[in-house]
Image (tube, helix red, strand yellow):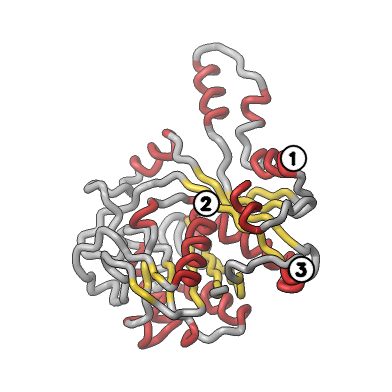
Amino acid sequence: MADALSKAGHDAAGAPVLLGTNGDHSGNMRFWRANAGGEQVPDSAVVNSLAGRLPDVIAEEFHFGRPRLAFVNACVAAANAIAYGAQLVSSGRADQVVCGGAHVVTEDLFAKFDSGQALATDGAVRPFSKGRKGLLHGDGAAILLLESADHARKRGATRLGSVLGWGLAADAHHPVQPHPQGRGLAAAARAALRCANVSPADIGYVNAHGTGTPRNDPAEAWALREVFGERAATVPVSSTKSTTGHMLEATGAVEAVITLVALADGLLPPTAGFLEADPECPIDCIPHTARHTQARHALSLNAAFGGANAALVLGAP
């Protein structure tokens, strides 16, 4: 948070705070373990572990304003926070918004994914690759200060990039599986492009959700074909989860920052761990090595259990 404010050259006092987070489950775990042993745990231990406490504590520490909201809808939470923050700014309801996400892997979360056999058994995330085994978790956090162009210009701020458009969609296909043709993700991407007034031909990079799981990657590749048509085979795509792991509620913010940095530096991150092309994922996934680019617009995609999907159109400085 302090680093974000330092780069922005601004304290953002009074700004709303919107964070994707699942809270700190240690308080709940402590409660149930104590309960099983006949002990008592103070209510404050449980209250302080709630997701809503994080934006509130941060707001008090840095003198931010309201609303103070926690987005808890899994892997699209931080992307939703950014989309909502951008809407607050674009509609004139806020001059600036602090938004992002934070996630720390806990033992109960690891146990859930392990019991669901979703974790990679070979210790590597290999998005869009033939022979991929699953995902791996990662800790992470990213914070962005969003503000209108006029507000940034008046205070002499250096713009690091732009949130040009956003789109949210639900396919309601299955509790945990994506729609096989990626309908929800394609709908979110199209909505984001319309919001940004940008055509698919203008997109020079896609930071894919790319979890490295057998079902998600083909569905996302299909969604890209729905959005880009024949160009889906050549538009540069990578999944940065191949190096960061999956940060669940924080992933949309971390990947938005990575995408903005990639556009600013003119260097697209690779998809690590790639073994060989999968016929079910006929895309240019930038395997192994970073690639230079002159792209000015990028698409960042995220999908979550329950058929929730989010897309952000991001622009270079």
| Res. 155 image quadrant | bottom right
N-term mark: 2 or 3: 3
* Residue at the extreme front of the image, as rendered: 156
Measure how far apart labels 2 and 1 are at the Cα level. 21 Å
* Disc number lying in front (2 or 1): 1
| Closer to us: 312 or 257 | 257
Residue 304 in picture, x, y percent from top left: 48, 58
The quadrant the C terminus occupies is bottom right
Q: Residue at x 41, y 52 (%)?
A: 246
N-term mark: 2 or 1: 1
Question: Which element carries disc 1, helix, strand or loop?
Answer: helix
The residue under label 1 is which amino acid type?
A: Glu
The residue under label 2 is which amino acid type?
A: Ala
Q: In this image, 230 relative to 97: left or right?
A: left
Q: Residue at x 63, y 68 (%)?
A: 159
Is mark 1 in CB contact (under 8 Å) with mark 3? no
Residue 302 in picture, x, y percent from top left: 48, 63
Task: Kindly tell me whether residue 245 is visible in this rendering.
Answer: yes
Question: Which element carries disc 2, helix, strand or loop?
Answer: helix
Measure how far apart labels 1 and 3 are at the Cα level. 24 Å
Measure how far apart labels 2 and 3 are at the Cα level. 27 Å
Disc 3: which residue: 151
Q: Is residue 142 above or below residue 210?
A: above
Disc 1: which residue: 60
Is mark 2 in CB contact (under 8 Å) with mark 1? no
Q: Residues within 10 Å of mark 1 (few under 14, many from 20)?
A: few
Question: Which element carries disc 3, helix, strand or loop?
Answer: helix
Q: Is residue 197 above or below residue 245?
A: below
N-term mark: 1 or 3: 1
The residue under label 3 is which amino acid type?
A: His
Disc 2: which residue: 250
